[in-house]
Amino acid sequence: MPELSRSQVLVYGAVAATLLLVGARAIRAESGAGTSTATASSFNGSGGFSLKSGGGSDIVVDVAGAVRRPGVYRLPVGARVVDAIERAGGAAGGALLEGINRAARLADGQQVMVPKRGPGGSIATAGVGAEDGPISLGSASVEQLDTIDGIGPVTAAKIVEYRDQHGGLASVDQLDRVSGIGPATMESLRARLQP
């Protein structure tokens, strides 16, 4: 094999460096595109929305209450409460959509409870009183949280604010990050709340 001159070595080195830079840029652009748009929702023309996944993993949520088709649904990571309601066939007649935050991000294992409109526009509890059963952490109002022993209106507002800022809560244990909730309050919350 003939020996390369100094200028040939420099040219081959420059070409190799350029190819490495172009390849690295292409790889970075490809991996960045997949993470920047993990989920998108678009109007599908039939009065609803459709979700498109960009390669991320899915979450599973339970949609209950005043929806047309209650059930457990798989949605892409980053989906919102409104997406889960649409997936369950939309709100049923008598749904009180103002009672939940439809813009909140969903968490895996979360239950979305769409409340029903009761007499005078209040929230109907579907036969479960405040003392009888657990309250849905994903849709509990400040007033509902205020009924739990050890939770006052200020702490209830902090819980709802934390839930909305962090895109929902997957478990009751996450509430220990809210200021004003100590170990005794956590035990009371575990007995009265469900994810």
Image: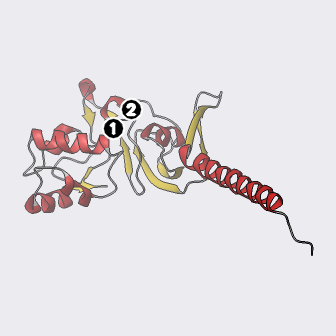
Q: In the rendered image, which quarter contains the N terminus?
A: bottom right
Q: Nearer the viewer, residue 22 or 87?
A: 22
Q: Choose top left, top right, bottom left or bottom right for residue 163.
A: top left
Q: Are marks 2 and 1 in contact (CB under 8 Å)?
A: yes
Q: Which amino acid type is shown beneath numbered disc 1? A: Pro
Label count reads 2
Task: Find residue 95 and name its label.
Answer: 2
SS under mark 1: loop
Task: Find residue 166 and name its label.
Answer: none
Question: According to the image, what is the colour scheme of the structure?
Answer: secondary structure
SS under mark 2: loop
Q: Position of residue 187 (x, y in %)?
A: 14, 63
Q: Which residue in the protein does label 1 denote?
A: 115
Q: Nearer the viewer, residue 21 or 104?
A: 21
- Up-down: is 121 above or below 150? above
Q: Quick one: label 2, few (<14), some, or many (20+) residues within 10 Å?
A: some
Q: Is residue 109 left or right of residue 143?
A: right
Q: Position of residue 132 (x, y in %)?
A: 19, 53
Is tag 2's residue or tag 1's residue first in the polypeptide sequence?
A: 2
**Residue 90 can be seen, yes or no:** yes
Instruction: Compute the Cα span from label 2 to label 1.
Output: 6 Å
Q: Which amino acid type is shown beneath numbered disc 2? A: Ala
Q: Position of residue 71 (x, y in %)?
A: 48, 51
Q: Quick one: label 1, few (<14), some, or many (20+) residues within 10 Å?
A: many
Furthest residue to the bottom? Answer: 1
Q: Choose top left, top right, bottom left or bottom right for residue 152.
A: top left
Q: Nearer the viewer, residue 142 or 24?
A: 24
Q: In the rendered image, which quarter contains the C terminus?
A: bottom left
